[in-house]
Image (spheres, grey):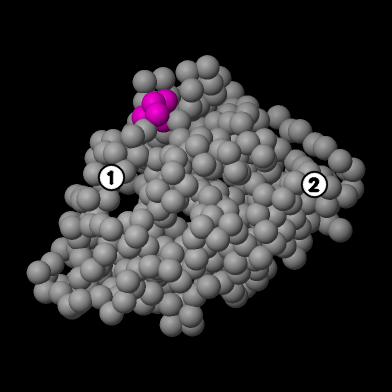
């Protein structure tokens, strides 16, 4: 099913959009992807594809307003709450976080990132707000050290994935987190994921209310993102598909999370910064606001300077090189995802052209089979949402093909 708005010749070629749809249909017809929603916007034209079904094996069709678990594609949105506090000088980039996060004061750092947890030295300096925003505060997922003691300890203390059960209250989560040493000195190296969970707690404590309440007041509601939050209410649960994770050996669908009665249908005790649910149109509103320099329908959401900070590379050449090396070691699974070079605040920023997307494109991908990026050079937004996790290469390959065909469809 296809929806189009704007002039038929104002951004995409008809042949290019047919090719895009054909590629998406091919992935669904392969049986590897039950369904998807794709939205592309450029040159005054928005084009949406809804293909396949909500459940594996058939049933209700995908709809434009289907609600998806965004996973790490949440990071670019939840980070905006911190940017509001920076704009208001309630946070400062290089201030230590200790006054709000005393659990992270007086850090110890492993002598070697793969060494025993007891072998530590004092941190050279406190963790700062900038360290959290750039994912360089010293702890997180290092794909090169998945068997290390610190990885096992971090997973045990902080993981709240479907397999691990729900997370505790943020204060208890931070207490557990504060018992861990850092793997690297603050500001030394980019590591994945955990910075934004900590950042969400920081935002809530500084704002004096929950992350969701503050995010809704200052970002979601002003943008009209009415279907975005940390759970799907009962009245909308029919719009949420199950979440599947294909078996890495057989490819058969394993149910990770059901819709009704599942985790996404319940308000969480811990509002993780990577745990939003949303729709393609809600995400289009957010990324279009970034392309507009922080403006939405005449209303300022973020300052232009805040948007520029978020969407330009903040890593040193050494940090970029280490990040690229880490992702290249898992490229067989990610189909090139993560290989952007740079990182801004809460999202990847391309600093070299390694595929069809140009330098300057920003956004991110999610482990539930989601992707959302904006491209300032082409004034382009692309969003692809599925219900299939990245336990096999199927979702990453779909996402790769979506971006490859999307850039071919541009016709100015």
Determine crowd level at label 2: few under 14, some 14-19, many 20+ residues with C-alpha closer than 10 A.
Answer: few
Point out the image quarter for the C terminus.
Answer: bottom right
* Residue occupying image coordinates x 53% and y 21%: 236
In screen coordinates, is 153 left or right of 277? left
Q: Nearer the viewer, residue 384 or 289?
A: 289
Q: Name the residue under label 1.
A: 171
- The quadrant holding residue 284 is top right
The region drawn magenta spans: 263-267
Up-down relation of residue 399 to residue 105 (above or below): above
Up-down relation of residue 4 to residue 363 (above or below): above
* Observer able to see residue 24: no
Can you give x and y, in whole percent of width and height, for residue 388 in the image? 45, 39
Q: How far apart are marks 1 and 2 (CA)?
A: 38 Å
How many circles with numbers are drawn on the protein? 2
Q: What element carries label 2?
A: loop
* Observer able to see residue 21: yes
* Residue occupying image coordinates x 65% and y 46%: 286
In screen coordinates, is 321 left or right of 169? right
* Residue occupying image coordinates x 26% and y 38%: 168
Q: Mark 2 points at which residue?
A: 298
């Amino acid at each position: 099913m296809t929806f189009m708005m704007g002039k038929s010749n104002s951004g995409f070629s008809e042949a290019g959009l047919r090719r895009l749809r054909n590629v998406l249909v091919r992935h669904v017809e392969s049986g590897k992807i039950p369904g998807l929603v794709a939205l592309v916007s450029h040159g005054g034209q928005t084009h949406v594809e809804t293909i396949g079904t909500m459940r594996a094996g058939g049933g209700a069709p995908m709809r434009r307003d289907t609600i998806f678990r965004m996973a790490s594609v949440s990071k670019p949105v939840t980070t905006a709450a911190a940017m509001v506090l920076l704009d208001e000088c309630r946070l400062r980039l290089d201030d230590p976080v200790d006054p709000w996060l005393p659990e992270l004061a007086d850090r110890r750092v492993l002598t070697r990132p793969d060494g025993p947890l007891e072998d530590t030295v004092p941190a050279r300096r406190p963790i700062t707000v900038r360290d959290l925003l750039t994912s360089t505060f010293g702890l997180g997922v290092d794909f090169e050290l998945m068997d290390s003691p610190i990885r096992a300890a971090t997973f045990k203390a902080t993981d709240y994935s479907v397999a691990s059960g729900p997370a505790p209250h943020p204060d208890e989560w931070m207490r557990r987190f504060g018992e861990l040493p850092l793997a690297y000195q603050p500001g030394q190296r980019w590591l994945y994921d955990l910075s934004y969970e900590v950042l969400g707690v920081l935002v809530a404590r500084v704002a004096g209310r929950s992350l969701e309440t503050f995010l809704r007041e200052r970002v979601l509601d002003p943008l009209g993102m009415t279907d975005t939050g940390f759970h799907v209410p009962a009245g909308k649960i029919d719009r949420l598909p199950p979440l599947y994770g294909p078996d890495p050996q057989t490819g058969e669908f394993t149910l990770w999370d059901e819709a009704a009665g599942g985790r996404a249908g319940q308000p969480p005790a811990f509002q993780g910064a990577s745990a939003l649910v949303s729709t393609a149109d809600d995400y289009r509103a957010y990324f279009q606001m970034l392309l507009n320099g922080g403006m939405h329908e005449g209303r300022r959401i973020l300052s232009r300077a805040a948007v520029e900070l978020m969407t330009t590379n903040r890593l040193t050449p050494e940090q970029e090189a280490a990040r690229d090396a880490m992702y290249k070691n898992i490229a067989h699974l990610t189909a090139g995802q993560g290989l952007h070079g740079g990182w801004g605040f809460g999202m990847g920023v391309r600093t070299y052209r390694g595929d069809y997307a140009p330098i300057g494109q920003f956004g991110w991908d999610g482990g539930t089979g989601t992707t959302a990026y904006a491209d300032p050079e082409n004034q382009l937004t692309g969003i692809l949402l599925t219900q299939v996790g990245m336990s096999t290469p199927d979702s990453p390959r779909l996402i790769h093909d979506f971006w490859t065909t999307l850039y071919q469809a541009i016709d100015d």
